[in-house]
DNA sequence: TAGAAGTCGTGATTATTTTCACAAATCCAC
DNA sequence: GTGGATTTGTGAAAATAATCACGACTTCTA
């Protein structure tokens, strides 16, 4: 709760760094420079050094960063030692794909349960995750604070209200609906149609640029 | 090709505005203010007005914006009159979900073909889209300039090289791999594991903030 | 032990994006 | 018509983010 001064842009890159450091350690590397890191994650090396510097002096001049140390540091910073439980709402095309994916691999986030309105899906399991009826939402949700929303857009607002009422604090929203939530609930929109459309727009209107993301 | 001065942040919001305007028109609304728009898409109204202003004076003071006019304008700006063809590489969990989704609904982007390495999938269709063997990539791709990448991370770089060699200019990359491409190829990364992880990070470290996105 | 090479951390600068705030224009009710 | 209510478009300011560039320190080699 202390590191409230870390720029949002930096915070968004932390998981990326963390994942790459994990890979490095698996490969047995013990040190890494901001330059190497930069080439791998496609973020300017000065930006990486700046990002790290918000957490203090993590590296050593002339040497770089010690992989194990840095990894341990990020593990703590990203709370990788405690599992974050997630609920998924809407076991359709997208929802099913997510249930089949192991987010826990290097992430310590786990979908614990799923909900759907379709009686045929209720009672079954996908990837070992039980699917409950959406009417059981309030009963089953327990202490889960994060939800993934993969229901039709028309249902989004109504279900969101129920999630919020039950204490959900973070929503990863894949529906095109822009949902309304109280100030203390955070929503990240992932709008795949818009991502595709904006990629196409950039292609047509920003030819030969060098700025990707 | 002319509007090269439009900020990237603005460009990314255009499809969002476009979609909402479409909905408005379907509802039969003829005018809309930046304030209404703001509430619907959760973007500050001053930002919306600024965004629009890059394209000239689209509204009328004291009145707001004419929905039909604005929509027509964005349709042209976003090239909605011509269909953009897309290829999907990797018909697994995610890839299948995308094939079942109709991006063309209000987007004018269409997945025309898919590729996979799995013989069992090759030759079949999903959502009316044919699945070819990845070895046919160069033969079948034709003039398609945009690709969606939903293959295992380990394959990403190799396949990317082939796509680029064949003339692909835009890649929507869902793999965790940070792929390397020439300057004239644009890559948008959508890294679902990182989105989830960063949402969790924000929840734990930025309590009671009001800034979502 | 000395010098060369490498690399961090950061002050300063620049770039980008958001937001404020208000004059000007328009609308609308009467 | 007139006047109060709206709402745009945009200068200016503020906030946020990226990048430059270099001093300081470390490592490595001989
Ligand atoms: N599939 C894609 O590639 C894609 C792309 C872009 C956006 N999206 C968006 O993601 C969302 C999900 O897409 P999808 O393709 O998986 O849709 P889908 O129709 O396959 O799945 C929706 C699921 O939600 C369930 N559902 C419906 N109402 C419900 C309710 N009230 N409570 C709980 N469950 C309910 C349905 O039974 C179904 O299983 C949609 O909003 C869609 O617009 C999907
Ligand atoms: N499913 C998810 O929810 C999820 C979440 C985050 C990230 N991802 C990433 O998205 C990508 C796809 O995930 P998925 O769950 O759909 O995986 P998947 O294993 O279900 O699908 C991968 C598909 O690619 C095909 N393939 C393998 N090698 C190929 C090649 N050389 N050429 C063409 N096709 C090939 C496989 O046959 C398979 O059909 C992965 O990189 C994964 O890390 C997926």
Image (spheres, coloured by chain):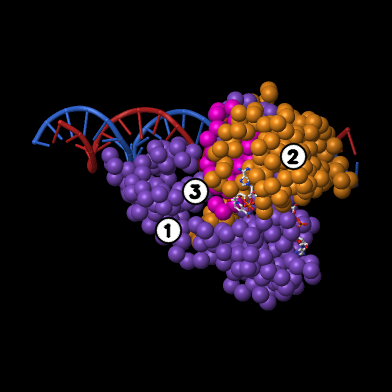
Chain colours: A purple, B orange, C blue, D red
Determine the CA span between mark 3 and mark 1: 12 Å
How far separated are the C-alphas under marks 2 and 1? 41 Å
Disc 2 secondary structure class: strand
Residue at x 56%, y 46% (from the top left corner): B153
Question: On screen, A106 above or below B71?
Answer: below
| Discs 3 and 2 carry the same chain letter | no
Ligand number 1: quarter of image: bottom right
Magenta residue check for A132: no
Report if the CB atoms under discs 3 and 2 are less than 8 Å apart.
no
Task: Determine which residue is flagged by label 2.
Answer: B113
Front residue of this view, candidates A198 and B59 = A198
Asked if marks 2 and 1 touch (Cβ < 8 Å), the reply is: no
Mark 3: few/some/many CA within 10 Å (<14, 14-19, 20+): many
Please state the extent of the stretch shown in magenta in the rendering: B170-194
Is residue B118 visible in the rendered image? The answer is: yes
Q: The disc numbered 1 marks a residue on which chain?
A: A
User: Image quadrant for the N terminus of chain B?
Assistant: top right
State which mark lies toward you, 2 or 1: 2
Task: Out of A120 and C10, give the one closest to the viewer.
Answer: A120
Residue for point 87% across, 48% down: B27
Chain of the residue where label 3 is placed in the rendered structure: A
| Residue that label 3 marks | A16
Marker count (numbered): 3
Between residue A52 and residue A84, name the one nearer to us: A84
Residue at disc 1, secondary structure: helix
Residue A135: mark: none
Of discs 3 and 2, which sits in the foreground?
A: 2
Q: Position of residue B71 (x, y in %)?
A: 81, 36
Residue identifier under label 1? A75
| Residue at screen point 67% across, 53% down | B93
């Amino acid at each position: 709760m202390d590191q409230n001064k870390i720029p949002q842009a930096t915070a968004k890159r932390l998981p990326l760094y963390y994942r790459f450091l994990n890979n490095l350690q698996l490969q047995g590397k013990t040190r890494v420079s901001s330059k190497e890191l930069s080439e791998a994650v496609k973020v300017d090396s000065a930006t990486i050094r700046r990002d790290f510097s918000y957490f203090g002096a993590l590296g050593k001049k002339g040497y770089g960063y010690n992989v194990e140390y840095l990894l341990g540091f990020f593990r703590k910073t990203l709370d990788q030692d405690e599992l974050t439980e997630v609920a998924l709402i809407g076991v359709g095309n997208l929802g099913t794909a997510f249930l089949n994916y192991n987010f826990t691999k290097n992430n310590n986030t786990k979908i614990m349960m799923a909900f759907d309105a379709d009686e045929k899906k209720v009672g079954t399991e996908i990837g070992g995750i039980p699917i409950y009826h959406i009417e059981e939402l309030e009963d089953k949700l327990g202490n889960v604070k994060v939800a993934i929303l993969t229901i039709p857009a028309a249902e989004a607002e109504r279900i969101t209200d129920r999630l919020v009422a039950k204490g959900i604090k973070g929503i990863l929203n894949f529906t095109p609906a822009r949902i309304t939530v109280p100030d203390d609930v955070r929503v990240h929109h992932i709008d795949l149609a818009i991502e595709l459309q904006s990629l196409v727009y950039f292609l047509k209107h920003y030819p030969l640029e060098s700025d990707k993301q």
